[in-house]
Image (cartoon, helix red, strand yellow):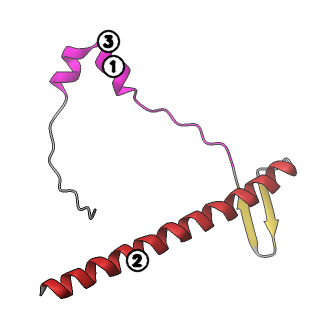
Amino acid sequence: MSANELTSKVRELKELKAMADELAAEITAIEDEIKAEMTARNTEEMTVDVFKIRWTRVTSNRFDSKAFKATHADLYAQYTKQTESRRFSIA
């Protein structure tokens, strides 16, 4: 791939990512409007036309590795393994 082609691909990628960010923001705004309406109606589930909308509470348990490391540093070190990955970025 030539330098011009690579530059063109990078520019296209940046434009597409900007469009994706704009779409994500629009999606979030619409979801927030629907959530606000559900809150106003004091409901976790509603049917609109053929769509069933749910906004429910979910409880989950997560391991607090930071607290575990603070209180059991030796065990934390014993069961921690280093991994390697690659990160792709364009500045």
The kind of residue on which mark 1 rests is Phe
Q: Position of residue 18 (x, y in %)?
A: 45, 71
Q: Which of 13/50 is in front?
A: 13
Q: Which residue was labeled with disc 3?
A: 71
Label 1, label 3: how many angstroms apart (C-alpha)? Answer: 5 Å
Q: Sort mark 3 into few (<14), some (14-19) or many (20+) by Cα contacts within 10 Å.
A: few
C-alpha span from label 1 to label 2: 43 Å
Q: Position of residue 84 (x, y in %)?
A: 14, 48
**Image coordinates for residue 58, horizontal then vertical, percent:** 61, 42
Kindly identify which residue carries mark 1: 68
SS class, disc 1: helix
Q: Quadrant of the N terminus?
A: bottom left
> In the image, what residue occupies the spot 70% across and 56% down?
32
Q: Quadrant of residue 51?
A: bottom right
Instruction: Report if the CB atoms under discs 1 and 3 are less than 8 Å apart.
Output: yes
Which class describes the residues within 10 Å of circle 2: few (<14), some (14-19), or many (20+)? few
Q: Which residue is mark 2?
A: 15
Question: What residue do we see at 27% from left, 14% from top?
Answer: 72
Is residue 60 part of the magenta span, yes or no?
yes
Instruction: Look at the image and say whether residue 76 sits in the magenta stretch.
Output: yes
